[in-house]
Image (spheres, rainbow, N blue to C red):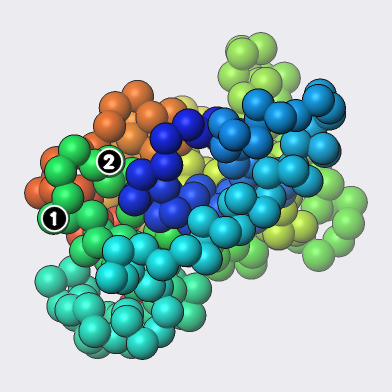
Amino acid sequence: MLETKGRVDIDVPLKIRAAVAWCRAASEGGIKWEYLYVPQEVFSQVDDNHLEALFSLCEPAKQNLIREKIEAPLSLEKGNLEKIAFDEFISDGDFDSLPLKAKKGVQEAIALFKFLENKNEVSYAPVFAPLLGAVDEAAKGYIISTLRDAIPEDMNKRQRFFEPDLSVLHPRDESFHKRQAINLRRTLLENDGIMHIGLLKWCLEYAKSPKVAPGGIFLAVKAGFGDPEQKGLLDTIDKIYSFRNEYIAHQEKEIEDRHAAKQAINEWIAGLIMILGV
């Protein structure tokens, strides 16, 4: 992820921290992301067109801004986080029940929101970067806990489980099923799948679909995610996934309304709690 920058305003260090956090979370899906911040004054002096050189020259400026104190001050260190009231977003009991990574994501997201809420004409998209990794990690855990008992121990059976006969499907559907089977296998066996919140959404939708599963892992998805009580979970995940695509991943729109951002944070935290089952 490369960002060029001219004027540096007071929100830039915050945005850099959010971008670094997003890359760290996205890299857990198996593809390594790095954030390259390119200040105009550095780029104007570059005479080497290799990306490695640009990283080397620009990294000091990025680190200086990351360390910079933001406006008297916002710090995500533990001392200041403890001063922020979280109860308008999550109860003490629910927060205490979260695993450490989820706690950290919730804390940082709320702290970022609190910092931005009294500013004018700001985007709240960076607020959701700390939650992105926590939600995706929770989704991965949910998928693994739901499907792991269905995986055969015998290696030959396991191969057929993840590679069932898909010839009965339309070629377009066959290709899609192959990709999903590969992602599920990587998630379940290698801890290396991608886009787990999207994969969980698909599992829940696929289980509801009237289409006949071709066998193997797809039958396991039908059986494991077919509980009618999971409908509420699907509705919540659908909102999170749509918001992620519209405002964060693809940035089709800017989220600048404080109330809409706050409502979305509450929905993401509620979804995180539902996925984790706390």
Q: Give the percent coordinates (x, y) of residue 108.
A: 37, 67
Looking at the image, which is closer to me, 204 or 199?
199
Q: Which residue appears farthest toward the right when viewing the image?
A: 156
Q: Is residue 172 left or right of residue 253?
A: right
Mark with earlier residue (1, 2): 1
| Residue matched to label 2 | 123
Q: Position of residue 261 (x, y in %)?
A: 20, 48
**Residue 259 in the image: x percent, y percent?**
10, 49
**Relative to 183, is 72 on the left or the right?**
left
Q: With 137 as the anchor, is 48 left or right in this view?
A: right
Label 2 Cα neighbours within 10 Å, binned few <14 / some 14-19 / many ≥20: some
| Residue located at (48% from left, 31% from top) | 6
Identify the amino acid type marked 2: Ser
For residue 118, the mark is 1
10 Å crowding of disc 1: few (<14), some (14-19), many (20+): few
Specify the amino acid type for callout 1. Answer: Asn
How far is disc 1 from disc 2 in space, using C-alphas?
12 Å
236 in relation to 72, above or below: above
Query: Which one is closest to the eye, mark 1 or mark 2?
Result: 1
Quadrant in the rendering for residue 163: top right
Answer whether residue 241 is visible to the viewer in this image: no
Q: Quadrant of the N terminus?
A: top right
**Quadrant location of residue 37?**
top right
Residue lying at 21% horizontally and 59% vertically, measured from the top left: 266
Q: Give the x, y percent position of residue 246.
A: 34, 31
* Closer-to-camera residue (255/53): 53
